[in-house]
Each structure stands twice: as structure tokens, then as C-alpha cells.
Amino acid sequence: GRVRAPQELRNVNVVTTQFSMPDLINFTNGFNAHVYPSWGEGLGYLPLETLAQGTPTISTHDWAQYSDYIDLGVSADLVESPWQWEHPGQMYKPDVNSICEQLVYLEENYDEIALQHFKNAMPLHAEYDWDILTQNAFQDVFNTFE
């Protein structure tokens, strides 16, 4: 009885528009929470970006390299991809009941969870500094050409 179509809920919007980076940042800054029960990471790393903003984020975590920062993880089963032509192999199918449980938990404990996510943002920024990550990833290449 908790799952309904987004158009039935006054606080839920489904957005399919492409955003510029400044517009995306402004858009996600307005979230009270980000719900991203994805079968796998697409382009953009949206859960990582909202976690970096300190936004409580509910997400499938099994596929995420940054799963240590996903406190509101969604349970998932590793299954054959239903989209073999696009994503061959296996993917993590999110459990709908787990999503609902995390939403209820977040609603019941919002202030505490929001504060914890805000505090987690700075260590996440330190670990996922793109300049440092890129330098580390390509250090062997740099050494070869120096």
C-alpha cells in the first residue's frame, strides 16, 4: 500500500530532462533525499554526487565502489540482465520491499540521518578528489613519459 505512481504524490517528480552541470547542482541541492535503486551505475554517478552534497541517499550499494558511504543501502539480488543487448551479463536487481523499508526509516529518523550524511560528505570529498584519483590511476603512464 505504500508504492504509488509518482503523479499521485505531491512531493515526487519524475524528471527526464538533460541538465547542465550548474542546473543539475541547483536541482539536486533542493532534494531532501535521493532515491536511486539502480540495477547498476550508469553515467554520471548520481548517488556519489548527492552523497558528496550531504544529501541522504537511498541506493543499491552492491555495485558501488563507494558503498561505504551508502548508509541507506537497498538489498539486491545478482541476476542475469534483462537487457542483454545493452548490458550483457549480470546486474543487481533492487528489492522493492528494501526500498520501502529504507524510505520509512529515513522518514522516521530524518534529522539524525541528514546530519550524518552531511558529516560524511567531507571524508567522501577527500577520498574521491578527481585530481588525485586521476593522478593515481595514470601514474604509471606519467612515469613512462617523463
Image: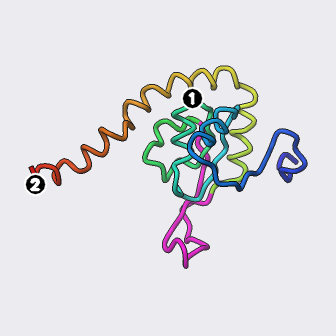
Q: Which residue is under mark 1?
A: 54
Q: Amino acid at mark 1?
A: Gly
Is 9 situated above or below 55? below
Secondary structure found at label 2? helix
Is 62 situated above or below 128? below
Q: Position of residue 146 (x, y in %)?
A: 9, 49
Q: Which mark is residue 134?
A: none
Q: Nearer the viewer, residue 120 or 61?
A: 120
Is 41 situated above or below 55? below
Residue at figure coordinates x 64%, y 35% from the top left = 26
Q: Is residue 74 magenta?
A: yes
**Crowd class of label 1 (few under 14; some 14 to 19; many from 20; radius 10 Å):** many
Which residue is the extreme one toward the bottom?
A: 85
Left or right of 50, for residue 15? right
Q: How many marks?
A: 2
Q: Which residue is under mark 2?
A: 144
Residue at figure coordinates x 51%, y 68% from the top left = 90
Is 98 situated above or below 54? below
3D distance between C-alphas at marks 2 and 1 = 39 Å
Residue at figure coordinates x 49%, y 28% from the top left = 121
The magenta stretch spans which residues?
72-93
